[in-house]
Each structure stands twice: as C-alpha cells, then as structure tokens.
Image: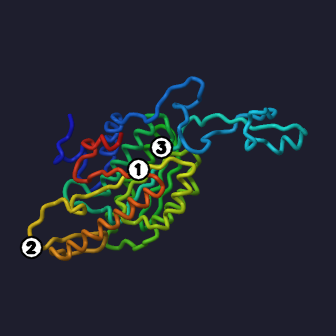
C-alpha cells in the first residue's frame, strides 16, 4: 500500500534517523529497475558494460596481434622477450557505486514532512539497497562542514550496513551539535577533490545535495570524474525554499539554518527565497556543464511516492 503524501515513512519521525527506517528503504529499492541490464553468460559481471572508462581487471598477457589496441602493450614483457606482448582484461565482477552525500548544515531544514537531511538519507539508503540488490559494490563519501566520512566500496550486506550505520551516527552528531557547528564554505569542494582520488574508472556516482554548497570550483574535479565515470545527481528540495507554500501578506516566520536563527517578514523572506533559488540554479548549471540533468526529490513527500524520479 502506498503512503499518502502527508504520512511519515515507516519508522520515521521526520527529524532523527533510526536503523529500522533505513532498512525499510529496501522495499522502495525493489521497485527500481536496473538500468541497461542485459544478461550475458560470456561476461563475469551482471551486465554488458555501458560504463565509461575500462572498468576492467587484468587477466593475462599474450603475444600482440594486429587487431590489438597498442595502449594495452605490456612493455616490460615485450622488452624481456623481444616479442610484442599485450595485456588482456576482463570485466569487473561488480560495478562500484559511490554516493557523494551532502549533509551540510543547510539540509537540516524542513517546513512540512521531513528534514531535507532525513530525505537525503532515505534516498542514499534506497540507492544503496538498489546497488546491493543488483550485485554491485557500494561505497560512499558523506560530507559535512565538520567531517568527511569515506566508506570503501563493499559487496552485499556489508556495503549497505556500513552506509546505514554511518548515516545514523553522522546525522545524530550534526543534530546534537547544531549550535556549535563550524562554518566551512569549501567543504564540498574538498569532497569533490577527494572523490576524484578514490573513484575508480567505470564507477557510477550519485550526488545527493540541496545544491547550496557546490561552488564553481567543483567543476574541475567533477569534469575529470565525468570522463571516466557515470554521474547522476539528486537535489533535495523543500516547499518553503521553493516558494511553493502559500503565506499570508504579513507574517513573522522563524527559520533556522544550521546554527543561524532568522525571523523573516514578507520583505526579508523574498530576499531569502531569491538567495535559496539562486544557489540551487547555480548547482543546476554546474551539473549541465558536465552533461548531468539533476532530479528533484521533495522532502515534503515520502520517497515511496516519488518512485518515478528514481527510475
């Protein structure tokens, strides 16, 4: 049975994260079909390779043949034997799936159903379950102003359990330290640079963010990643930040962003809203420069009611 838009997801209170609600995301993941899935007994993996980069592992060396790629010549063996030899590769058994999850201060915001950070965690867990269900290896880089948590790609339940445990721990630390969190405008740039170093060619990278902290400087590492990896992006939105909530002509609206407490009237709200939308548009343009079309996930609706955006 599908949830109504006003109902909280199973086991969720909308603010905190618990193990049960992240494990329940497996039910959502089952409804996501595998993209480009084509079985082939001749391959060791689960699909014909449609990924960028070689995505291959070394198998053996044999004598060079006319149709071989000269880039695969093994020069050491060639020098030792005096006969040209080439390296042979086979497809990797499991494709690495990497999540770049933005848990910045700005995502600890919610005007309706869920904090954006909670929705981001639900999405990360769902994508993680989907990867595990399709036999891929799952890793993540979870970034905030105070810490970057790197999870190396692992197979099966090891991959998803390390993700859910890390999400709960970091999310709770952020909530408990909201009044004393540091301000670091370059933390997502460093996260992108770190991801560039750890992502292997052929990986699939999902970026999950609200788009508030990805500066133009992130274009460099993201462009390099896009040459050898597939990249997709999700923007976690909130109806208040989108200007979709009907507000009276005159009001006083308390808004908290990280450790900053604001009291917005009509004039200051319009300025604040314009800034929110401007930052989001800057992220969208950044993604388009690397030929990525972001998808939008609304924190005011359960993820189970937005499955069309995950397919």
- Among the 4 quarters of the image, the one containing residue 170: bottom left
Q: Badges 1 and 3: C-beta atoms under 8 Å apart? A: no
The kind of secondary structure element at disc 1 is: helix
Vertical comparison of 179 with 39: above or below: below
Q: In this view, does 128 lie above or below 33?
A: below
- Residue occupying the point 41% across, 50% down: 165
Distance from the alpha carbon under mark 1 to that under mark 3: 10 Å
Image location (x, y in percent) of residue 183 = 40, 74
Q: Which mark is residue 165?
A: 1
Q: How is the image coloured?
A: rainbow
Horizontally, residue 73 falls left or right of residue 218, namely right
Compared across the picture, whether 90 is left or right of 67 comes to left
Q: Which sits in the foreground, 133 or 69?
A: 69
**Secondary structure found at label 2:** loop
Name the quarter where the C terminus is drawn: top left
Q: Which of marks 3 and 2 is nearer the N terminus?
A: 3
Q: Where residue 49 sits in the image (x, y, percent)?
A: 55, 35
Q: How far apart are marks 3 and 2 (CA)?
A: 50 Å
First in sequence, mark 1 or 3: give its number.
3
Would you name the residue on which mark 3 appears?
A: 159
Circle 2 residue: 250
The disc placed on residue 37 is none
Judged by depth in the image, the label closer to the viewer, 1 or 3, is 3
């Amino acid at each position: 049975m599908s949830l109504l838009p006003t109902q909280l997801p199973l086991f969720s209170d909308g603010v905190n994260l618990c193990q049960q609600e992240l494990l329940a995301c497996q039910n959502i993941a089952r409804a996501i079909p595998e993209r480009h899935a084509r079985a082939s007994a001749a391959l060791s993996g689960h699909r014909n390779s449609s990924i960028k980069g070689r995505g291959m592992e070394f198998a053996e060396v044999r004598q060079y043949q006319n149709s071989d790629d000269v880039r695969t010549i093994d020069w050491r063996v060639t020098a030792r034997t005096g006969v040209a030899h080439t390296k042979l590769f086979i497809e990797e058994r499991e494709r690495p799936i990497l999540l770049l999850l933005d848990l910045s201060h700005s995502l600890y915001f919610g005007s309706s159903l869920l904090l954006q950070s909670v929705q981001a965690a639900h999405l990360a867990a769902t994508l993680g379950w989907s990867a595990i269900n399709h036999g891929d290896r799952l890793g993540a880089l979870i970034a905030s102003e105070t810490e970057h948590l790197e999870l190396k790609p692992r197979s099966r339940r090891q991959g998803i359990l390390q993700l859910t445990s890390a999400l709960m721990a970091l999310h709770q630390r952020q909530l408990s330290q909201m009044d004393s969190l540091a301000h670091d405008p370059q933390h997502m740039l460093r996260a992108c640079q770190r991801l560039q170093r750890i992502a292997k060619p052929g990986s699939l990278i999902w970026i999950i963010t609200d788009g508030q902290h990805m500066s133009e400087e992130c274009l460099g590492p993201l462009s390099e990643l896009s040459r050898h990896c597939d990249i997709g992006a999700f923007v976690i939105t909130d109806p208040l930040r989108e200007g979709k909530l009907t507000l009276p002509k005159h009001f006083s609206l308390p808004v908290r962003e990280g450790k900053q407490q604001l009291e917005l009237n009509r004039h200051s709200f319009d300025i604040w809203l314009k800034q929110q939308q401007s930052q989001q548009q800057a992220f969208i343009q950044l993604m388009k420069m690397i030929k990525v079309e972001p998808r939008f996930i609304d924190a005011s609706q359960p993820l189970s009611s937005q499955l069309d955006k995950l397919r």
